[in-house]
Image: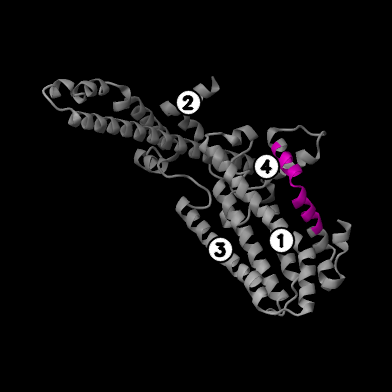
Amino acid sequence: EAQGGSRQRLADGSFAGSLQIPSPPPDEGDSRPPSRLRNWEEMAHGRDSLQRAVSSLYRELQHLRNYCILNYTGLVKILKKHDKRVTGAGRKRLAAKPLLMAHVNTLSFVAHDELKRIEAQIERGYAAAFCDANVQVARAELLVRRERGGSATQRGLALGLRLGVAAVLATWLFWDLVVDTRVLPLPSARKADLQYAVIFHLPVYRLSLAVASCFYLWAAACSVWKRARVNYLFLFELRDDEVLDPGAALALGTQQLTLCLLSLLLFSKCMLSELDLDASLFPVLLFLSMAFTLTTPHLGWWRRGYTASGFLRALAAFFSTPFSPVSLWSSFVGDIVTSLVRPLVDLAYSSCYVFSGEWLRRPDRQGSCHAAI
């Protein structure tokens, strides 16, 4: 009944009166109650969420109208082709287009009057709630896809640039590690250092690649759920600002992959004596940047408006079980965490390697963290 009442209010535009959100509370210094600002932020979030939902519904109605037009056009072309193929004396009697089109034109999907009526009601309700009763402005806003972090074109261009940078770095790294090492002679000391590097620094880079893979897999899962029209936010009891959408997850995964390739390239340059720097510095910087990305996901223009509260809350519920209620989302996150055995071992080793100061030692004197883990 509640869903039916909401749909009825959406259809007749009566929901507009309940969406008049007051202006932000004035800056009253320390005497301002925190609940006032929190309540206003919750109302603003609800308003923004409803705008995206109504815009998505309106676009789906537009797709339904296009589907009707496409089917009607296809039927007309099929009947026209049929009548052209009919020859002989009974051509007029066997012509299907006049007879069938007389019946088809009476069907509701041809005129789609009910669809037009619903679209007009949504436009009026949206205009009354968000556009000062300006239907033309409301129609224009409803047809624009509302996304975080810029338009779909901007995000696609940024993602393409990042993937291009990652491809260039991967090619450069392949040339240095495969081609140069086979052509250029390496001293025995450098070969020993490379062996130490594989043992003591490979887990850090493996962890970074695992984090990038997790972002890519989350983007793929969200895309599949959306294509299958699965409301995963409702099932997981999450708000849309608590998890990353596919575009933001792809951007973060590509960023992590680019940083990993760049760090590995600079690390290989140091190991091949092409840079006069400490090679252990670059895995440490990579680990710190990765930790910053995972612990502060609300920062950065590509993640504008997102928080990690959903993921962190699920982790807290997972580790505090059975002393806290378990939800579907915490079970989902817990199942993933228990499957990441090797990345968790690499995380323990990387934390020990970075925070114990082992990376400050000579390569031949490292190995305490590797022996402990």
Cβ atoms at labels 4 and 2 below 8 Å apart: no
Is residue 311 visible to the viewer in this orientation of the structure?
Answer: yes
> Marks 4 and 1, how far apart in space?
27 Å
Q: Residue at x 76, y 71 (%)?
A: 194
Q: Which amino acid does label 3 sit on?
A: Ala
Q: Residue at x 18, y 21 (%)?
A: 94
| Residue bearing the label numbered 1 | 205
Is residue 25 visible to the viewer in this orientation of the structure?
Answer: no
| Residue bearing the label numbered 3 | 167
Number of the front mark, 4 or 1: 1
Label 4 CA crowd tier, 10 Å (few <14, some 14–19, many 20+): some
Residue 122 pos. (x, y %) = 41, 32
Q: Give the range drawn in magenta.
A: 332-349
Residue 33 pos. (x, y %) = 68, 43
Q: Which residue is drawn at 86% across and 65% down?
A: 367
Residue 127 pos. (x, y %) = 40, 37
